[in-house]
Image (spheres, rainbow, N blue to C red):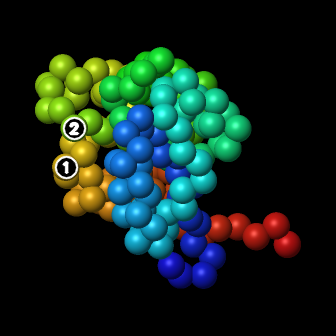
Amino acid sequence: MPPGEKRIRTLVIDDAIDFVRYLCAFLDTLSNVVVIAKGRSGREAIELAHEWAPDLVLMDVRMPEMTGLEAALQLTRELPGIVVILMSAFEDEGVWKASLESGAFAFVMKERLTQELPRLLEVAGSTKGWNGPTQNCA
């Protein structure tokens, strides 16, 4: 990553521990992303987002306690600068439509995540200013 470029502070939220490990290993290969916290439910996503103030939340749609859809709706209302990308292992047009209605930036099938995420981060980065140099407090 070029000097002065901002790393995308990311929360990974999924109740499947093996998928979290897989996703974090993939994210470690991206020089512009840093995983700052992980959670296992929509409720944890909200708590962690308020605590850590991430740029990005990568979150499963189907989880216990609170779904990713419910959490995305609350997060985008309470923290409007946050980017939420919802993901699912299940192809369901209703979930895709509901994810867009929740305020999520995007919905991605888990099997396509490693192919689509870099492009989505570039688009989100252009929208949110992640791609520009950081400002020093000198």
x%, y% of residue 55?
55, 48
Q: Amino acid at mark 1?
A: Glu
x%, y% of residue 122?
37, 60
Q: Which residue is mark 2?
A: 89
Q: Amino acid at mark 2?
A: Ala
**On residue 59, which mark appears?**
none
Q: Taking the image as drawn, is residue 98 in sight?
A: yes
Q: Residue at x 22, y 38 (%)?
A: 89
Pick the residue in front: 134 or 99: 99
Pick the residue in front: 123 or 45: 45
Q: Residue at x 36, y 35 (%)?
A: 60
Q: Secondary structure at mark 2?
A: loop
How far, Cα to Cα, is label 2 from label 1? Answer: 7 Å
x%, y% of residue 11?
53, 46
- How many marks do you count on the picture? 2
Q: Residue at x 70, y 67 (%)?
A: 135
Q: Residue at x 37, y 63 (%)?
A: 26
In the picture as drawn, the residue positioned furthest to the front comes out as 18
x%, y% of residue 33?
49, 63
**On residue 111, which mark appears?**
1
In this rendering, the answer to whether 30 lies above or below 111 is below
Q: Quadrant of residue 24?
A: bottom left
Which quadrant does the C terminus fall into? bottom right
Sequence-first tag of 2 and 1? 2
Q: Residues within 10 Å of mark 1 (few under 14, many from 20)?
A: few
Q: Secondary structure at mark 1?
A: helix
Q: Residues within 10 Å of mark 2 (few under 14, many from 20)?
A: few
In the picture as drawn, the residue positioned furthest to the bottom comes out as 3
Q: Contact, CB < 8 Å: mark 2 with mark 1?
A: yes
Left or right: 103, with 110 as reference point = right
